[in-house]
Amino acid sequence: MYYSVLSCIILYYPVNLVNLVNLVILGILLSCYPVILLSCYPVILLSCYPVILLSWES
């Protein structure tokens, strides 16, 4: 699916500098997203934990 979308982008848009930069940024975002998610997850968990605990108590 991802490759077909990529080939469609390449086929339908003339690959000028802006589109190339957008593709690179998109690629970086896609590859960084899991890392960002993993680094944020403990923080979210820690901030939610007391709330979950309090709601469990009541």
Image (cartoon, rainbow, N blue to C red):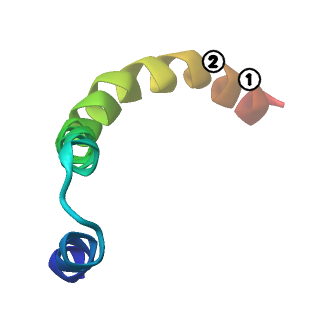
Most foreground residue, 44 or 22: 22
What secondary structure is marked by label 2? Answer: helix
Query: How many numbered marks have been drawn onto this rendered protein structure?
Result: 2
Q: Are marks 1 and 2 in contact (CB under 8 Å)?
A: yes
Within the image, what quadrant is residue 37 found in? top left
Most foreground residue, 20 or 28: 20
Task: Judge from the rendering whether residue 43 lies leftward or rightward of residue 58; answer left or right.
Answer: left
Q: Residue furthest right?
A: 58
The residue that label 1 is drawn on is 54
- Point out the image quarter for the N terminus: bottom left
Q: Position of residue 10 (x, y in %)?
A: 19, 70
| Rendered position, 13 above or below 18 | below
- Point out the image quarter for the C terminus: top right
Label 1 – label 2 distance at C-alpha: 6 Å
Q: Amino acid at mark 1?
A: Leu
Q: Position of residue 54 (x, y in %)?
A: 74, 23
Most foreground residue, 5 or 34: 5
Q: Amino acid at mark 2?
A: Pro
The residue that label 2 is drawn on is 50
Residue 6, disc: none
Who's the residue at 72% across and 35% down the image? 56
